[in-house]
């Protein structure tokens, strides 16, 4: 069984619906556990992730410089790496408020291309649909 979730992060923090998803999907004993010494052990080794951050009014320079990529850091370090995922790619799309229709279509196509590339990189025996028990 594998968990697939198309997560497009928006701006500076994790939104409530997304937070609820992570609270229900990333559970003790499934994605992490405590060792006998009381240390965290991530159970998702050899898994990959891609974080796509979108921003309405921020450009990448402001997101990194002023906000310290705070939402990305929360998701990457606080959830994914905590659970053992170390191969994490990230992309930034924005500022969306200045995008015209052609820009929006290009961004959507870029995300679709990333998804296709990511599924091509799946190990042999792993399929990109829910037919894998």
Image: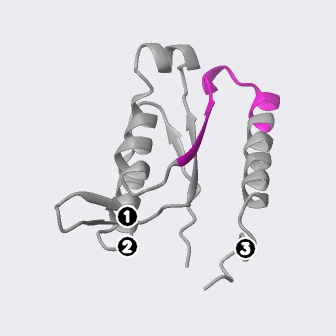
The answer to whether marks 1 and 3 mark residues whose Cβ atoms lie closer than 8 Å is no
**Position of residue 45 in the picture relative to residue 109 (left or right):** left
Residue wearing tag 3: 127
Nearer-the-camera pick, 28 or 39:
39
Colour scheme: one colour
The answer to whether marks 2 and 3 mark residues whose Cβ atoms lie closer than 8 Å is no
Q: Write down the region rendered in magenta.
A: 87-105
Quadrant occupied by the N terminus: bottom right
Q: Earlier in the sequence, mark 2 or mark 3?
A: 2
Front of the two marks 1 and 2: 2
Q: Secondary structure at mark 3?
A: loop
Residue 59 visible somewhere in the drawing: no
Q: Residue at x 82, y 30 (%)?
A: 102
Quadrant of the rendered image containing residue 12: top left
Q: Earlier in the sequence, mark 1 or mark 3?
A: 1
Q: CA distance from mark 1 to mark 3?
A: 21 Å
Q: Is residue 39 above or below residue 78?
A: below
Residue wearing tag 2: 30
Tell me, yes or no, whether the highlighted magenta stretch contains residue 94: yes
Q: CA distance from mark 1 to mark 2?
A: 7 Å
**Picture disc at residue 26:** 1
Q: Secondary structure at mark 2?
A: loop
Q: Position of residue 126 (x, y in %)?
A: 70, 74
Quadrant of the rendered image containing residue 74: top left
Quadrant occupied by the C terminus: bottom right
Q: Residue at x 77, y 28 (%)?
A: 103
């Amino acid at each position: 069984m594998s968990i697939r979730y198309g997560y497009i992060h928006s701006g500076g923090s994790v939104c409530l619906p997304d937070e609820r998803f992570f609270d229900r999907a990333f559970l003790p004993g499934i994605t992490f556990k405590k060792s006998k010494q009381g240390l965290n052990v991530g159970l998702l080794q050899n898994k990959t992730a891609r974080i796509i951050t979108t921003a309405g009014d921020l450009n990448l320079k402001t997101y990194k410089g002023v906000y310290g990529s705070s939402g990305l850091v929360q998701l990457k370090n606080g959830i994914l790496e905590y659970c053992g995922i170390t191969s994490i790619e990230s992309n930034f799309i924005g500022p969306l408020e200045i995008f015209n229709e052609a820009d929006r279509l290009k961004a959507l196509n870029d995300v679709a291309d990333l998804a296709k590339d990511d599924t091509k990189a799946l190990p042999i025996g792993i399929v990109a649909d829910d037919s894998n028990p």
